[in-house]
Structure formats: C-alpha cells, structure tokens
Amino acid sequence: MDEKIKFLLKETLDIMKILGNDLSKCMYIMQSAPEDVTWWRLQIRIWFSILDTYCFILKRPLLEINSKRNIFLGPKDMEYLKEQRLDTKTGKPRLIKMPFIENINHIFKISNKILGTNYLLSKDSKWTDLKDAVDIRNRITHPKIRADLTISQKDF
C-alpha cells in the first residue's frame, strides 16, 4: 500500500479514536446525570463530528487514488474533494463547506466514480432519521432562541 495512503488511514484511526473517547466519556457522564441535557447536546455534536470527519478524511485517499488512476473529474468534483475553490478575485484557494446531507450524498457519488463501484445510498426511514437529526444538530449548534437548545427524549 502507498505510504501516503497508509499515513492517511493512520490519521483517520487516530482522529476516530479521539472522538470515540470523547463520546465514551460523554456517555459515561450521562449515566450519572441523565436529566442534564448538556450531555445530550454534546453527544449529538460529537456524533456529527465523527460523521463529518469521516467524510473529510475519506476524501483524502480518494484524491490520492484518483491521482494514480487518472479518472476525469470535473472542476466541481475536484473542489468538493479538496474542500476549496479558487477565489475569482484573489486567485487564492478558499475553503468551501458543503451542507452535511449534500456531503453524504456526494461522498457516495464520487467514491463510486473513483473506485468503480455502484453503491446506492439507501433513502429509507434511517435516512429520514438522519435528516431529522441534522435539523436537531443545526438547531442546537446555531440557536436563535432559547427553546432551540431544548432536547427532548424523542429528539435524542
């Protein structure tokens, strides 16, 4: 296996280990204070950090694999993988961030293209649950009113 890909995989495991430890500590604390929604909000944020990090880290080996296979990717796909686009005024790279659900959809699409697979992302009830969870995550991460920070047992 290519050394750069090995490094990227090790980096992925290290990040996931740290986030996994954060999640374990949060869950442990929640056991002693189940009524404290602070830990519910934190756990939701950690789960989304894990998913978002996984998508980002998956892009790095996909870029490396694509550079070896030389599969044509359009400019938008390259911007997506690099998470940056050239600023038309300055000519410098500018960070871009794709909305979470769009990012999940696109990672499957681009992976299929680069890896030559045909995996279809199931849009079943679990997909709907994930989309609902994104709304909750957005609400608690970017609150506009006090009630936005409320988490119910159903939400959790």
Image (cartoon, rainbow, N blue to C red):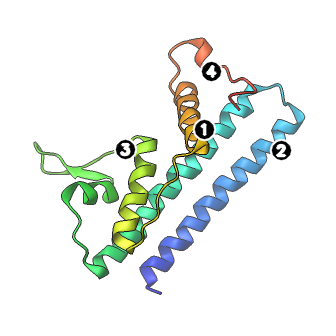
Counting residues from the N terminus, which is met first, the one under dot 4 or under dot 1? Answer: 1
Query: How many C-alpha atoms fall within 10 Å of the one at disc 1: few (<14), some, or many (≥20)?
Result: few
Q: Amino acid at mark 1?
A: Asp
Q: Secondary structure at mark 2?
A: helix
Counting residues from the N terminus, which is met first, the one under dot 2 or under dot 1? Answer: 2
Point out residue 88 in the picture as x, y percentages from the top left corner: 11, 45
The residue lying at 40 percent from left, 63 percent from top is 59
Along the viewing direction, whichever of 101 and 89 lies nearer the viewer:
101
Label disc, if present, on residue 28 of the rendered structure = 2
Counting residues from the N terminus, which is met first, the one under dot 3 or under dot 2? Answer: 2
Disc 3 vs disc 2: which is toward the camera? Answer: 3
The residue positioned farthest toward the left in the image shown: 89
Point out residue 155 in the picture as x, y percentages from the top left corner: 68, 28
Residue 42 falls in which quadrant of the image?
top right
Disc 3 vs disc 1: which is toward the camera? Answer: 1
36 sits to left or right of 32: left
